[in-house]
Amino acid sequence: MSLFSNTAVLLSKELRTEFRSRELLTTTVVFILVVLILFSFAISPTTEESREFGPGLLWLAILFAASLMLQPCFLREQTNDTLSSLRLAVSDPFSIFLAKLIANTLFLLLTELIMLPFFAIFYNVPVLPEFHWLLLVLLLGSLGISIAGTALSAISAQARMRELLLPLLLLPLLTPVLVVSATVTVGLFEREPIVKGKGIAFLAVFDVVFLTALWLFGEYLLEE
Amino acid sequence: MAPIKLSPTGLRFEGIDKRYGGLFALRRVTFEISAGECAVLAGRNGSGKTTLLRIAGQIVRPTAGKLSFPGSSADSAGDSRPGYVGHSTMVYDELTAEENLLLFARLQKVESPTARAEDLLREVGLYERRASLVRTFSRGMRQRIAIARALIHRPSVLLLDEPATGLDPLGITWLANSLRELNRAGCTIVMSLHGESEISSLATRAVRLDAGSVIADTKTGASLHDILTFGAA
Amino acid sequence: MTKRIILGAVAILLVIVAAYASFFIAPQERTMGLIQRIFYFHAATAWAGEMTFFVCFLANLLYVWKRQPKYDWLGVSSAEVGLACITVVLITGPIWAHPVWGIWWTWDARLTTALILFLIYVSYLMLRRFGEGDQTPTIAAAFAIFGFIDVPIVYMSIRWWRTQHPQPVIGGGPNSGLDPHMRPALYTNLLAFMCLAALVVWFRYSVAMAERRAEDEAAQRALAENPLSGKLESQGVR
């Protein structure tokens, strides 16, 4: 199906571009690290508190980092007007979104995995028990952030004050992801780890709803 | 250049309007370019040339009116999309010339994309620099990669927006020769130009726009020279 | 014009009746005292805010589908009125809560959702204002659709989150166990503020459409008078 083959071609372009310069990845990793360190200075959590508050801070840091990382997503298509050539070349504009959101999810996940050991050490939090569940939460949460973020990046790229506008649009929209992901992660870090299935299902539903909305309305975001 | 596989296709504008807020960039533009013609759109800055070309390239939607490509065969759906060369290169600076052409060839489902990309690179004289990032290209080379990208799917109609801007005399000669060959192979060419040059001498048709409306057309008797140099004297 | 005068008169009359009902007809609440009367105003504005929310959502859906400017302006008008309503809700809530329960704010589902809705309205209107280009209404409409789909999700997620973190009980929702003597006050307020909201949306919409008509006529006149004048360079249109 041409949607998937176009998405694959565009995805390899996104990955190739980013891994050539690695600008976005390195700045995002450093940013999350700095935010987490600053948080722990501000709060100085004890180990018990870390278990309770750490996940919230972790997801907050991820959210902030994502709102920075997603800025260039559609902005860089404006420098040489490549957005127009892409729109001319593909039969379904959704493939452009799909490729970008998959790439953004992968970048976010990579950043989170690099950063996880530091988080575990600085906050004295056990991340290894139930690691596969943690991975699932990170995946579903990052996916939700990417879907909304990619859509809003396309929206804010066409506006003035876009550096301010993207976080302003993104953060309220992603409140459910923040709240639910943090709560599920807290459950996974407890002394007797519990898996909050309802929360995980909730994240999956969020992802599906927004992906569908993007599929339905995405092409309007790209028009000129 | 290798003969382009195409069915001769024209370009027809019917009552095209384009509004931006309270301003009309284009008003009731109606004319037709026949298959195989090499047409020039002339006019001052702000007359609507770029807007009209972007509408023809289907990048921008008109507020009113109809755009059609008479003569395009129904089964060559990919070919009926015109090739568009704009003010920007519309390729990625951080990819090599080859990677860029491969990207667009694959997206548009061109047959044997690798061979096609190679052929085009040779034709535009960029084969030696195929592994260089487009970021390192000179203005002339950027124009050439832009044209290669526009031609990747063998379009029957090629649109160019002020293609000679920033080119040195050698570049202009190359461009004129390339366009002449394409036109001979049957490609309909529509380009916007300022004034007379080696490139404008290829024209078999010219239309002048002013403030969004057609004010002169060689089809209705105006001379090519007059259209290109209107008001300059 | 007369329709609007009539509706305006009805709305004002209803507001007066509602105010009277709130202060004189409804009985004094046993524990909370006088301050409780603000609840009628608060609940009514909340309902009006939710009503304009739906109108805005539908208007934006219609705009994206049909592309007629009237739907876009309906969306903007209802968003502006909705913003006003939600602001009132966010202000009257704490005013009521503080003397009664000793806290200004709590992160329960309804309040949090109201806050998020406020932010979404603000973002939508800012996007409309700061957007560049021809497609701003379409893009803002798409954002509105995304935003408003999110609101029920926010509500449900906070509700679930609350079950995970036991919080001080705030006392059942405003509509639980309402004394039947309070109902007339509540209903008159609901009716009054929904009328008022509808009226203001209608006014705002008419102003916007009148402005747009004036703009259209000016453009047409410019076309007729001066076919060859080109003011486009100064606008940066190539």
Image: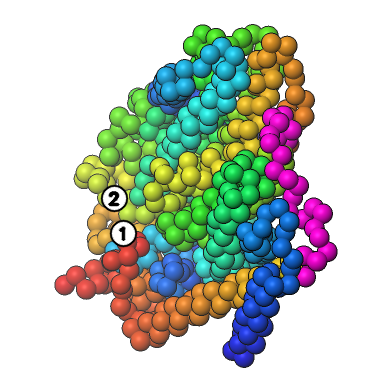
Q: Is residue C77 above or below residue A134?
A: below
Would residue B82 appear left or right of B141 to someone viewing this image? right
Query: What x and y, as percent, mark residue C46?
Result: 66, 59
Q: Is residue C171 magenta?
A: yes
| Disc 2 residue type (three-letter) | Ala
Q: Are marks 1 and 2 in contact (CB under 8 Å)?
A: yes
Query: What x and y, as percent, mark residue C71?
Result: 61, 68
The segment highlighted magenta reads C160-184
- Badge 1 sits on which subunit? B
Element assignment for label 2? loop
Residue at mark 2: B164
Which residue in the rendered view is the most extreme toward the left?
A: B233
Q: Of marks 1 and 2, which one's residue comes earlier in the chain?
A: 2
Labels 1 and 2 in the same subunit:
yes
Nearest the viewer among A174 and A207 is A174
Nearest the viewer among A45 and A79 is A45
Residue at mark 1: B193
From the image, give the main secondary structure of the stretch colored magenta: loop
Element assignment for label 1? strand
**In which quadrant of the rendered view does residue C170 lie?**
top right
Q: Badge 2: how crowded within 10 Å, few (<14), some, or many (20+)? A: many
How many angstroms separate mark 1 from mark 2 (CA)?
Answer: 8 Å
Q: Residue at x 69, y 73 (%)?
A: C24
Query: What x and y, as percent, mark residue C79?
Result: 57, 62
Give residue A4's mark.
none
Q: Is residue B54 visible?
A: no
**In which quadrant of the rendered view does residue C39 lie?**
bottom right
Q: Badge 1: how crowded within 10 Å, few (<14), some, or many (20+)? A: many
